[in-house]
Image: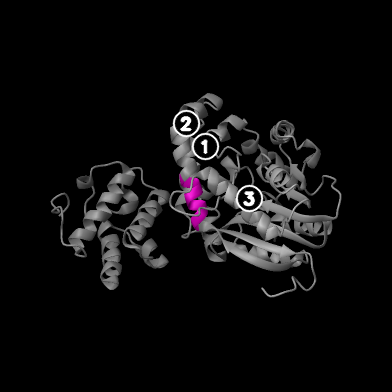
Amino acid sequence: MSTADVVDPDLAVAATNQHYELPAQVFAAYLDPRLKYSSGIYAGPDTTLAEAQTAKLHLIARRLGLTGGERLLDAGCGWGSLILFMATEYGCHATGVTPSRTQAAYIDDLARTMGVRDRIDIRLGRFAEVSTDGDYAAATMVGSIIHMPDREQVLTRLRAMLARGGRLYLSESCFRNAAVYREFNDRPGTRHVMENIFGFADMVPLSVLVAAVETAGFSLTGLDDLTAHYKRTIADWERNAETNRDAIEQALPGGFEPLIRYLRTANAGWGYTAKHYALTAANLRLGPEGTP
Amino acid sequence: MTAATPAGATPGTVDAVADVVRGYLAQEMKVEPATIADDEVLKNIPGVDSVHLLRVVSRLERHWDVEFDDEQIFASVTLTDLVTLVTSYVRAKD
């Protein structure tokens, strides 16, 4: 039985929003200035969190083959770091989908401030249900598919929105393999992070995501292991949270301890129980031409 | 031997490895190294959970730039078990 059979996607959205509806000030106290809530890419030992997040966004652009001006769809756009970056740095027309009213309002404000409101399209709601146009050149799911119980339908819908030759970039945290998933998924520590922090999250192994990408009809074109980078990213978040403990407590009284517990739990398992992968795929029957 | 481990034990010896393992465990659990006995069951150290233990294992792997066998990590019950595991890797490396 797949998760989609037992978890109502609407309940998953309601539950997931518990975390992402928290005031942006909480996240501003430990994330980078763009509030990018996913792994950065650390070029060297002195790389800062902000630099790592910028490098990550450029990596995504490279993996998507962006050259400028493309239409891009971000399913699960968080606080809009990716769509705003692609709009400002690559001149993309970017659509972001989020079920969080707080995030949608935040992005709307920021897009105006940055002068790219005309290139940003925000859709409030569940990705599987919101109306969006088709013919996108690129689509991204950065740490969002974990919150969607109906992952095969989501990817099938996403592929239908891509132009022929359109690219998908999908990154996600995964249990290390099927055996670890079976062993750890029901443990109290896992349930705490998945239910109390995120409301709904199903950290399936990469093989399950690959199967879903195949089922949706994509050609899988690449895979990056970003686990080491996520470990450094969360270590930076943890340091920031400790430094800004007062700001966190002010925005969310009693919020500091659970946050630190979540960050430590999440960061302890990398390589032992968890991995973080980014895969790229193309809506192209034969995959890319040219020498790999 | 607990706190009596001499500082600066010859690198690679069981004593030297035990110093480092006990030190990391004590740091992680914010206790004095001397309070962790050789036959201490790791899971019984007050306040410890699997996250603490994984953080310690991760630091040990980084300390010696090795990767322990998964099953052997989870099979380590006492401090001595963990020290024995680490020592075998440290010696294999030299």
Mark 1 to mark 3 CA distance (whole Å): 19 Å
Mark 2 to mark 3 CA distance (whole Å): 25 Å
Tag 1 and tag 3, C-beta contact below 8 Å: no
The percent position of residue A207, horizontal first and vertical second, equals 63, 66
Tag 2 and tag 1, C-beta contact below 8 Å: yes
For mark 3, what is the residue?
A: A57
- Mark 2 or 3, which is nearer the eye? 3
Identify the subunit bearing mark 2.
A
Classify mark 3: helix, strand or loop: helix
Identify the subunit bearing mark 3.
A
Q: Quadrant of the N terminus of chain B?
A: bottom left
Is circle 2 on the same chain as circle 3? yes
Classify residue A203 by image quadrant: bottom right
Is circle 2 on the same chain as circle 1? yes
The answer to whether A206 appears left or right of A268 in the picture is: right
In the image, residue B55 sits, relative to residue A292, either above or below, namely above
Magenta-drawn segment? A228-235
Classify mark 2: helix, strand or loop: loop
Residue B84 seen in this snapshot: yes
Q: Quadrant of the C terminus of chain B?
A: bottom left
**Type of residue at label 3?**
Leu
The answer to whether A206 appears left or right of A249 in the picture is: right
- The mark nearer the N terminus, 2 or 3, is 3
Identify the subunit bearing mark 1.
A
The percent position of residue A180, horizontal first and vertical second, equals 52, 62
Q: Which mark is residue A30?
A: 1
Count all numbered tags in the image, as a single digit. 3
Q: Nearer the viewer, residue B6 or B71?
A: B6
For mark 2, what is the residue?
A: A244
Dominant secondary-structure state across the stretch colored magenta: helix
